[in-house]
Amino acid sequence: MNGHYSWVSSAHDSDFSLDNLPYGVFRASREVGIGVAIGDYIFNLAALGALGFFEGIIENPLIFSEKSLNNFIALGPTVWERTRAHLQTLLSAGNESLSAVRDQVLLKREGTELLLPVSIGDYTDFYSSIDHATNVGRLFRPDNPLLPNYRHIPIGYHGRASSIVVSGTDVIRPRGQVLPSGGNTPIFTLSNELDFELELAFIVGKNSQLGTAIPIAEAESAIFGVALFNDWTARDIQKWEYVPLGPFLGKSFASSLSPWIVPFAALEPFRVAGPIQEPPPLPYLTTTGSHHFAIDLSVTLATSEGNSATVCRTNARTLYWSMAQQLAHHTSNGCNVRVGDIMASGTISGSEIGSFGSLLEASAGGKKPIEIANGVTRSFLEDGDSVIMNARAEQDGVRVGFGEVVGKIVSNSS
């Protein structure tokens, strides 16, 4: 495999290469439109459509002037593929068809406001990292960290779509019920154990019918793309509330989504086999071939004191359950999904120190603070701290990045 070259010179050494072309929604000069990231620029598809460059490709190019990607996504895989190929042709080195209008169709990414890329109807968070499940399990059940159902079923919970925010949005420290250490009665207070969770999320690309499952063999064709995701968590609120029904207010105060959605097709060069699943999953979850992806992920913590450190490096290839298995299981009972629904992986962690995708793991539940720099340590996040997540896949000259997911913790004065 060799990477493709663009006349946009900044794309040559960029996560936003011609092999990538992630979709996003931007606001410029009070106008909202859809674009793809290429190097240091946004390729303005709304302007491109107005100039007639989608003739024969998209029946209604005004679709790129909308405030979300949903209606474009709903056109289906054939249109996605045709559009992607057309954009790659227009942007390829040597193509002069846009030479007279380049200033009209290219926007500098820096300084351009990026919005939530999709209108999110529903959001489900999975628990797909066996290393994360084991790391957390050891904190509470040292002799039996992995629950008996884990290797049989993709565990998930239904999250709150309304509080998903685009990268760069501040996160207000939540209040909730917390059981003080050694106490028997909860108090209502600010969370003191605020955490991040490093995740990937896929965007559902088709509507399914209530009562009809998406078969495992068709699941990937129902995925439009993948984005970086931070599922912020208040561990002290979660700890008190999660029995018996699972996550609730400890999660629903905020989740951060990347403004860029990497097309599923762009991940094709990075397919790998996942971990051996033993015992073998039930037939409706059984796949053949490679359905995992080698994507490097990292988390940098910039503290309120002005120090920063990379606190996690890991890879998505270690996820136990694939995206295809997550979607097939989600619909196996007949639950219908809709275009723009988000399904996140759950925290992505490795098994070694330095590969943990949450502070809960890295600080052993707050008992072993991690050092950032110059004597500054963290067990959990403090006001003024910023979390910066990155993801990238690179192989044989092909480079595909997800951009950043950034969030800053701000105090709750209410």
Image: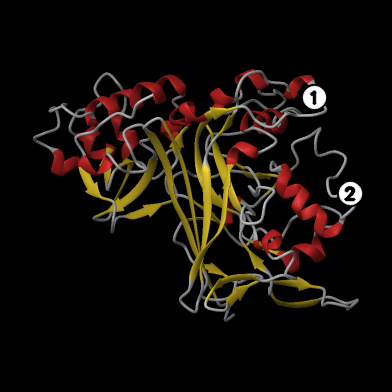
Identify which residue, 1 or 185, lies in the foreground: 1
Give residue 149's position: percent from left, percent from top: 85, 38
Q: Secondary structure at mark 2?
A: loop
The quarter in which the C terminus is drawn is bottom right
Q: Is residue 171 above or below residue 137?
A: below
Compared to residue 25, the image places residue 291 above or below, namely: above
The residue under the point 80% across, 62% down is 241
- Badge 2 crowding class, 10 Å Cα cut-off, few under 14, some 14 to 19, many 20 or more, is few
Residue 136: quarter of image:
bottom right
Q: Position of residue 39 (x, y in %)?
A: 28, 44
User: In the drawing, what numbered circle is on residue 280?
Assistant: 1
Q: Which residue is mark 2?
A: 144
Q: Is residue 60 above or below residue 173?
A: above
Give the mark, 1 or 2, whose residue is nearer the N terminus.
2
Does any portion of residue 246 appear in the rendered image? Answer: no
Mark pair 1, 2: CA separation: 21 Å
Secondary structure at numbered mark 1: loop
Identity of the residue drawn at 12% across and 28% down:
96
- Quarter of the image with the N terminus is top left
Amino acid bearing label 2: Asn
Q: Tell me which residue sits at (73%, 29%) in the image.
A: 276
For this view, does 155 lie left or right of residue 203?
A: right
Residue type, mark 1 in image: Pro
